[in-house]
Structures are given as C-alpha cells and as structure tokens.
Image (spheres, helix red, strand yellow):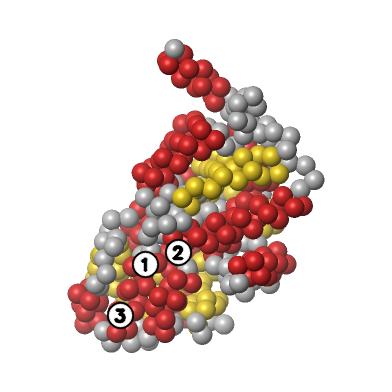
Amino acid sequence: MKRFNRLLFAAVVSVGFISTAVNPAFSAEAIKIGFVFSMTGGAAAYGATQKEGAELAVEQINAAAGGVKIAPIFEDDASVPQQGTNVYNKLINGDKVAVIIGPTLSNTAKITNPIAQQIGVTVLGVSNTAGGITEIGDYIFRNSLTEAVVIPNTIKVAKEKLGLKKVVLFYGNDDAFTKSGADVFRKVLQAEGIQILSEQTFAKGDRDFSPQLTQIKSQNPDAVVCSALVEEASGIVNQARQLGIPKTVRIIGGNGFNSPALIKNAGDASEGVVVGAAWNISSTSPLNVKFVDDYTKKYNRPPDQFAAQAFAGVHIAYQAAKAADNRKAIRDAMVKIKGLDTLLGQFSFTEGRDADHTPVVQEVKGGKFVVFGN
C-alpha cells in the first residue's frame, strides 16, 4: 500500500498538478507560495529583511488583487542546509505549495533546489548569486544578479576610478558563495591586468583575521578584494582599519557586503568600502521610490538590497502564477517574463533562467550605501 501511495503521488506531481481536494496549491481564491529564508543563524542579517520585503509585497498584492491572492507560508532554514531540506520537503509534500521563493544562501540552494527540481516545483532565488544554481534544472530561477555579472562591472569601475594595479584576494574557502565569488574575482582581475599579490583565506565563523591582515598590510596593495558573507566581512573591515591598513586602501566586496549590518557592525571602518550590487536605494524609478517609502513607513528603517530583491521576487512569481492552474504552467510562464517593470528596473530572465538587468557599484559614504563616485 505504501508503494502504491508513492507511485500515485509521483504520477500526480509528474503532470504538475495537485488535486484541489487535498490541501490545494491552486484555487480560485489564493495560490500558495512558500518562502524559505535564513531568519535565524549566521545569515539572519539577510533573511530577516527578505521576510519583511516579501511580507510587504504580499500585503500590497492581496490588497489590490481583484481575483487570486497569495497565501504565504514562511519557513526559517536557520542558515543551515539540512534545515533547508526539511522545510523544502514540508512545503512541497506537506503544504503542497505552487512555488518556492528562497532560500537565502547559495550553500543551501545547492542542497535544496534538486528536491524541487525532481518533483517539478518552480523555485525563485532572490539572493543566490553563486555559480551553478540555475544549472540544477529548468524549474530553478533567480532574480538576484550573479557574481559573474556583478563582479566584472565592479572591478572595471573600481579600476577606472581608483587606478588599481595590485591587490590581495581574501575569501572564505568553505562556502559555495564565497568560493564562487573568489573564482570570479580572480578571473576578472587577471583579465583586467591587475596583479594579485597574494591570496588569503578564512573559514565561516572565524573571528580573528589579524594574521591574514597583517600579511596583507605588509604587501602594500592598492585594494583588498574580498568575497565574504556579512558576519565575517564586518570583522575583516573593522580589523583591517584597527591594524593600520589605511582607508586609501579600499576594501572591495562581493554581494555578501550588501547589508546595512556591515555599516552597523563595522561603523566608521566601513567608510569607503566598495561593493557591486543589483540595486541602490537612491534609484528614482517610481516603483523603487514607492517601495522605499512604503518599507520605511512599515518597518521604521530603510530597506536593503535583500528586502528589495525579495519584494521584486514576489511580484515576479505572482506574475507567472496568477493565471496558472498547475506547477508546470508556472514554470512555463516564468520563462516568458521579459521586460517586466520592477523596482530593480526592466527585468527579464536569460535563457539560463538567470536575472537580466543592469548592475550598479556602491560605496559606503556618510554611513550609507551610495552610488560609487557620486
């Protein structure tokens, strides 16, 4: 009997449809969307604001919707891949969601997304930027610009404005995101003719970076190019200045630096940090201005990039799902999204289901992220 039930379930999901008789993903009233964010643990600085951005989008869509609304189910993966696996299985097989938005970390996505791909549930990553995510399968999408898109633009702009000739590459060697970012940085630096004086590494959870930074200081680089998540990034930035690496030696970060937590944790030491980004709060597009205003009023502080991408992600997923009556139809509608007006700009998916819109380069100036050079 158990074997028969498994076969029956496989047959049902193979056509992308869950019967509305049993906990439906689709109905005339609402479509279930599962959200998997790191609301606790090491990546909570990202996941907490993602949840806020997503909640704001759901609230506004449901208030305006004349027809189908969103029934959200939020889950915390605690910044741990195994917990991500648990909540994916719950959302897909228990809650029978139509689509999943998340998870926060690329490390987790590489473990969880194959589960959704095998069953045929669309996943929209709103912060996964490491290589290899969308290659998992044709149900996997992301609206977060990859490091492969953002980093080349960042280094090109930094070279033009700062005259970079020699740098040190500093990165986390035990995380998919930080290792992928380092690979892209290395390739781009070499292509731009910028000398890499040395490569220094650290591990997730490290607190003391003084041995590496002392060596970096002795090499007198023009900049420190760093691929790190915000917790380690904050320590690196703070300790670099404490050890006497001057602010004229810019620290250039990957997407993990894009959090107000960096400025909060590192304080004045973060001034002058340069980071590539998919979004900047100062964009004057009407959708972005409204989002920033609405978010600030609701949460009593301005949004960050992770809130913005989550907000945009809900609108993108809803655009695909609102007229669908099965999981495959959502996937097919997602592929067709081209030139959608979002707070990120005109948004499209590439043939590989990655985000296609214009990146920006930011720096920390006056205690906030501003467009680099402004």
User: Which amino acid type is shown beneath numbered disc 2?
Assistant: Ala
203 left or right, relative to 327: left
Q: Residue at x 26, y 84 (%)?
A: 243
Residue 189 occupies which quadrant of the picture?
bottom left
Residue 240 - label: 3
Spatial distance from mark 1 to mark 3, Cα to Cα? 15 Å
| Amino acid tagged 3 | Ala
Q: Earlier in the sequence, mark 2 or mark 3?
A: 2
Q: Which quarter of the figure is the N terminus placed in? A: top left
Give 205 or 119, whichever is nearer the viewer: 205
287 versus 221 height, above or below: above
CB within 8 Å, label 2 to label 3: no
Secondary structure at badge 3 equals: helix
Residue placed under numbered mark 1 in the picture = 231
Mark 3, Cα crowd under 10 Å, few <14 / some 14-19 / many 20+, is many
Report the amino acid beneath label 1. Glu
Residue at image position (22%, 76%) is 210
Left or right, residue 207 beside residue 151: left
Residue 139 vs residue 264: left or right?
right
- Spatial CA distance of label 2 from label 3 is 22 Å
In the rendered structure, find residue 272 and report the number of the disc placed on it: none
Residue 174 x %, y %: 28, 56
| Percent of width and height locating residue 45 | 45, 64
| Any part of residue 335 in sight | no
Q: Nearer the viewer, residue 297 or 351?
A: 297
What residue lies at 33% left-to-right and 87% top-to-bottom? 246
The residue that label 2 is drawn on is 45
Determine whether label 2 and label 1 are within 8 Å by CB: yes
What's the distance in space between the residues labelled 2 and 1, CA to CA?
8 Å
